[in-house]
Amino acid sequence: MTLTRRGVSVLGEREARLLEAVERVRSIKDAASEAGISYRTAWSAIQQMEQTLGRPIVVSRAGGPGGGATTLTDECRRLLALYHDLKRRLEESMMQVWQRPEAAAEAGD
C-alpha cells in the first residue's frame, strides 16, 4: 500500500521501514542500512517525501559531545501511525471479504 499526495507517492512499505529505523537508530545512514537500502536512496526518499508534503519529516542535530541525532517530526510520527492503521484496516477488510462464502464460491469459478 502506498499513500500519495497529488498523484505523487509519499509513503509506502519501503519508506515506512526507513522512517521506523530512523526513529529507532536516530541516524539516516544507519537506518538506511537497517532498511536494506543505500544512504543515497534513503536521503532521496526523505527529500521526496518532504518536497511532496511541503514540510520536514526529520529533524537532525549536528554531532558534538553527545553525538548527532536524527528524529522524526511529530507530524511524521502521526503520518506513519496513520499509514499503519490504514494498512491494518485494509488487510482486515480484505480478510472479511475473502472469508464470505460467496467470495469463496466466486473464486472457484
Image (tube, rainbow, N blue to C red):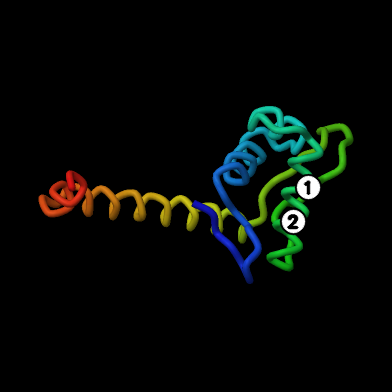
The CA distance from mark 2 to mark 1 is: 6 Å
Considering only vertical position in the picture, is 4 above or below 67? below
Query: Position of 83 compared to 42: left or right?
Result: left
Q: Residue 102: where, in percent of width, then height?
A: 12, 54
- The answer to which image quadrant residue 40 occupies is top right
What residue sits right under mark 2 in the picture? Answer: 48
The residue most toward the left is: 101
Picture disc at residue 44: 1
Residue at 17% across, 44% down: 108
Element class at badge 1? helix
- Kind of residue at badge 1: Ser
Residue at 36% across, 54% down: 90
Query: Position of 16 compared to 29: left or right?
Result: left
Considering only vertical position in the picture, is 86 above or below 61? below
Q: Residue 50: where, in percent of width, then height?
A: 73, 59
- Kind of residue at badge 2: Gln
